[in-house]
Image (cartoon, rainbow, N blue to C red):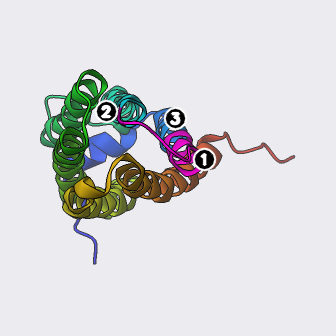
């Protein structure tokens, strides 16, 4: 059973912008492009892993930060602060991975960034379930992020190909999720056609 809307939640729902689908679809695109790179690059080097993984996390973090005001939650509100922390964790981890290369660095830093962002999104998904259109997506994305963060360090000894495989597989799963969400939001944002 959904909890009744509080005035803050009602305001967020009415303030949600009709172009919320844009950052959602761009996030999906970033995830799917990274996933495709990991699938089709047969023998990635440590530098390729650092750049591709770092750019993916950096881009995802920036898109998450850009999309917060479009959710209807101000950055100063509790959900805005939590989602800002998720975006900052991904952005920071991505910047670190672009600059620092190594199997251990990638395994630990990517796991930290994905874990922190996953925990924040999971919290928002649970807390705002039934009260925000993205709550189910945050819930699923949070579980995917936490799961990836939990298993990524176990693949450090297997090298760049294995690390990219784990991160890329999770990116593909979350990318498909965000594509479905973005297309649904896009469809719902279209003005209803006027019937005579």
Q: Is residue 43 magenta?
A: yes
Q: Quadrant of residue 60?
A: top left
- Which circle's residue, 3 or 1, is located before the other in the chain? 3
Q: Which mark is residue 26?
A: 3
The residue that appears at 25% across and 41% down in the rendered structure is 106
Check disc 2 and report the residue beneath it. Answer: 61
Give 107 or 177, whichever is nearer the viewer.
107
Depth check, mark 3 against mark 1: the one in front is 1
Q: Quadrant of residue 79?
A: top left
Q: Which residues are magenta?
A: 32-46
Depth check, mark 2 against mark 1: the one in front is 1
Q: Is residue 33 magenta?
A: yes
Check disc 1 and report the residue beneath it. Answer: 40
Q: Secondary structure at mark 2?
A: helix
List x then y, in percent, for residue 80: 20, 36
The answer to whether residue 160 is seen in the rendering is yes
Callout 3 crowding tier (Cα within 10 Å): few <14, some 14–19, many ≥20: some
């Amino acid at each position: 059973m959904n909890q009744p809307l509080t005035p803050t939640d009602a305001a967020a729902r009415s303030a949600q912008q009709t172009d919320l689908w844009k950052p959602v679809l761009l996030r999906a695109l970033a995830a799917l492009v990274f996933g495709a790179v990991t699938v089709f690059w047969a023998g990635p080097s440590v530098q390729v892993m650092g750049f591709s993984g770092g750019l993916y996390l950096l881009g995802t973090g920036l898109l998450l930060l850009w999309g917060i005001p479009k959710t209807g939650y101000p950055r100063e509100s509790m959900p805005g602060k939590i989602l800002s922390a998720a975006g900052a964790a991904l952005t920071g981890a991505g910047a670190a991975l672009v600059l620092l290369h190594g199997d251990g660095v990638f395994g630990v830093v990517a796991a930290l960034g994905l874990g922190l962002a996953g925990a924040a999104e999971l919290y928002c998904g649970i807390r705002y379930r039934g009260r925000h259109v993205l709550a189910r997506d945050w819930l699923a994305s949070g579980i995917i992020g936490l799961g990836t963060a939990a298993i990524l360090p176990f693949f450090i000894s297997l090298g760049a190909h294995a690390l990219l495989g784990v991160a890329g597989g999770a990116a593909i799963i979350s990318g498909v999720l965000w594509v479905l969400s973005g297309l649904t939001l896009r469809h719902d944002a279209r003005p209803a056609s006027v019937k005579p």
